[in-house]
């Protein structure tokens, strides 16, 4: 037992060497303290195993409820568990967000899935036939037009080995001797040689000269422009097949009839990227396929004679030809022109590794944008509402603030009546003839035809709520996607026949995790191993509800993320060892992974 005597005499305060019991500090207020408390619990290792599926997630989803093990066919409940008997009385599930600024671990998983999905469409695998490696394929880049002069880094001749870490000497940004000032009195030239990562890259030389309205409208209609471009390229290829005498293919329909289609078609995969100026541009993989008359969903090579040059010509023709005007808007009765910019890059893809652009390089280049959104512009926010738009939009602010303001201003509802403040007052009724009007919803008395309180609430809900093209005003989507600077499309889109889906990759990962601790017997060349037992299959049905987001304490997050980081490190080391083993194995032998 520890002594409570002081080493030095004291009157009212303890001495400097006091060993008496003092008040125990509350360590749970710090991350290290709460982690220590969690690690000293007897169920610590059970808790680690329980949260392993979402250990690396920064904001996991907590679910509460019951889990039932059901026998298929009969529906008999074999087992029942409730989350109250589990650690923290909840099930942790990874958020699955693709943005690295929100959750780096889930974003890395999404990026790897995107790489596998894109590469499978070029070389096969994951259910895609390996014959696609012989199909003509092109890596295309479609950029937005110019909406004004912006600061840029231009390098005419690269001498660096890695473009991602380019340290070459850049040319002057906008060296012009015939132009001094813009109409607003600002310099229209820039003699600076910008370095990589310069904060002014992508920002206009003059904010008032830049057409922010046109850019956000182009972003919202860029998906339609891509759709029309793909259709124009397919029409060009169909006419080329007709000129070469290749007949159309008859395929059966669901009603039992037959219809004739072109013998060649495109199977693209597209990735969207937001530039530093806030304009979206597309990187696409376009693969040329044929049509199987017996099975239209089958992936077959194109007819003989079609080469990668034909695919390049079709895409270049479509990029130059396609242009349209948007529907009329009160601010622009004639609409805005939508077309591609002058920079259209088309490079053939070599799946055998012989060319400059290979399948792995393209898939890795496109997959790196899986975790990015608007970070290049310096703006990161969630969906904006009528309450938060004032924090980001400013018609006289910087470049990003003006883009957000343009989204909110152009996307305003144009079919609603004029605001109550702008309406002329109704003539006062003569007393004794018309009763005083009272709003049935809130009881407000007013001389207007509509209640000002209820109309304001409905207007605010309309401004912040989702809107669709069916409303008749396609510009209303700009408010919904103001936090994305007007772009409301998906990051990655692909043709149905190009490759597998993200859902298939997720389901495969789930099945692997469920059976990774079981002993597996690998089948031989002659078939499955003899005497293999068929495991009884059971069905797990969950009746779960949302219980919250995030870890309970910062200590839990620290321990879970540390365990996940160690697991990722072991996984990476295993990959390196396996690659080294495969690279040093003598020819003619097949290594067996442990």
Image: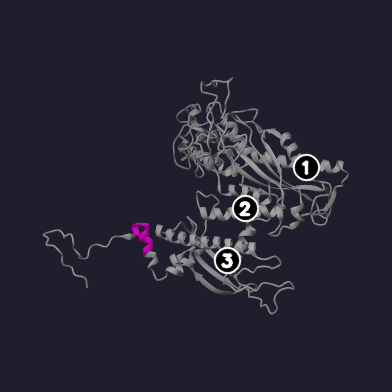
Residue sitting at x 50%, y 71%: 81
Q: Which residues are magenta?
A: 28-36
Secondary structure type for disc 1: helix
Residue 174 in the image: state x and y as whole percent: 57, 27
Badges 1 and 2: C-beta atoms under 8 Å apart? no
In the current view of this chain or complex, which residue is farthest to the right? Answer: 245
Q: Does label 3 or label 1 sit earlier along the sequence?
A: 1
Q: Does label 2 or label 3 sit earlier along the sequence?
A: 2
Tell me if residue 381 comes above or below residue 91 in the rendering: above
Magenta run includes residue 41? no
Q: Is residue 364 left or right of residue 135?
A: left
Magenta span: predominant SS is helix
CA distance for labels 2 and 3? 20 Å
Give the camera-side residue of 119 and 390.
119
Residue 77 in the image: state x and y as whole percent: 57, 74
Residue 352 in the image: state x and y as whole percent: 72, 52
Q: Is residue 570 left or right of residue 471?
A: left
In the picture, the quarter occupied by the C terminus is: bottom right
On the image, numbered disc 2 is attached to which residue?
114
On the image, numbered disc 1 is attached to which residue?
309
Marks counted in the figure total 3
Q: Is residue 28 left or right of residue 55?
A: left
Q: Residue 416's image quarter?
A: top right
In the picture, the quarter occupied by the N terminus is: bottom left
Tell me if residue 449 comes above or below residue 259 in the rendering: above
On residue 513, which mark appears?
3
């Amino acid at each position: 037992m520890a002594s409570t005597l002081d080493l030095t005499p004291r009157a009212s305060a303890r001495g400097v060497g006091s060993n008496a019991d003092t008040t125990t500090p509350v360590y749970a207020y710090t991350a290290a303290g709460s982690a220590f408390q969690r690690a000293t619990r007897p169920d610590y290792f059970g808790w680690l195993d329980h949260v392993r599926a979402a250990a690396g997630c920064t904001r996991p989803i907590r679910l509460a409820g019951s889990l039932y093990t059901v026998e298929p066919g009969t529906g008999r409940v074999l087992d029942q568990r409730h989350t109250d008997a589990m650690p923290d009385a909840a099930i942790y599930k990874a958020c699955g967000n693709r943005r690295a600024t929100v959750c780096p671990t889930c974003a890395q998983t999404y990026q790897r899935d995107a790489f596998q999905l894109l590469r499978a469409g070029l070389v096969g695998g994951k259910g895609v036939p390996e014959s696609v490696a012989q199909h003509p394929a092109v890596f295309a880049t479609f950029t937005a037009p110019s909406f004004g002069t912006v600061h840029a880094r231009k390098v005419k001749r690269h001498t660096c080995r890695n473009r991602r870490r380019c340290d070459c000497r850049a040319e002057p940004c906008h060296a012009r001797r015939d132009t001094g000032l813009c109409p607003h009195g600002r310099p229209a030239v820039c003699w600076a040689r910008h370095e990589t990562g310069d904060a002014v890259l992508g920002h206009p030389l003059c904010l008032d000269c830049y057409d922010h309205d046109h850019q956000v409208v182009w972003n919202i209609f860029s998906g339609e422009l891509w759709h029309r471009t793909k259709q124009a390229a397919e029409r060009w290829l169909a006419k080329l097949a007709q000129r070469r005498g290749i007949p159309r293919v008859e395929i059966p329909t669901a009603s039992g009839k037959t219809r004739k289609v072109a013998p060649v078609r495109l199977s693209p995969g597209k990735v969207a990227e937001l530039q530093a100026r806030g304009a979206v541009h597309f990187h696409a993989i376009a693969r040329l396929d044929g049509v199987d008359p017996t099975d239209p969903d089958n992936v077959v090579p194109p007819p003989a004679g079609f080469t990668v040059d034909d695919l390049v010509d079709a895409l270049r023709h479509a990029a130059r030809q396609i242009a349209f005007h948007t529907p009329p808007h009160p601010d622009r009765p004639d609409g805005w022109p939508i077309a591609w910019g002058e920079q259209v890059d088309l490079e053939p893809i070599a799946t055998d590794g012989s060319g400059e652009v290979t399948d792995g390089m393209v898939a890795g280049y496109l997959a790196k944008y899986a975790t990015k959104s608007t970070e290049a512009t310096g703006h990161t926010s969630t969906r904006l509402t009528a309450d938060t738009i004032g924090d980001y939009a400013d018609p006289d602010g910087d470049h990003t603030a003006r883009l957000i303001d343009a989204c909110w201003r152009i996307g305003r509802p144009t079919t609603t009546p004029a605001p109550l403040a702008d309406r002329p007052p109704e003539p006062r009724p003569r007393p004794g003839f018309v009763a005083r009007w009272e709003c049935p919803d809130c009881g407000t008395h007013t001389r207007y035809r509509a209640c000002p309180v209820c109309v304001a609430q409905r207007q605010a809900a309309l401004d912040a709520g989702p809107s669709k093209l069916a409303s008749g005003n396609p510009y209303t989507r700009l408010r919904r996607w103001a936090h994305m600077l007007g772009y409301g499309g998906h990051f990655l889109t692909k043709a149905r026949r190009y490759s597998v889906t993200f859902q298939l990759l997720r389901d495969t990962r789930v099945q692997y995790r469920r059976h990774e601790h079981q002993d597996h017997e690998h089948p031989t060349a002659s078939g499955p191993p003899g005497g293999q037992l068929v495991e009884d299959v059971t069905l797990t049905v969950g009746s779960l509800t949302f219980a919250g987001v995030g870890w309970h304490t910062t200590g839990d997050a620290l321990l879970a993320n540390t365990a996940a980081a160690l697991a990722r490190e072991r996984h990476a080391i295993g990959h390196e060892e396996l690659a080294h083993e495969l690279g040093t194995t003598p020819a003619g032998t097949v290594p067996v992974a442990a």
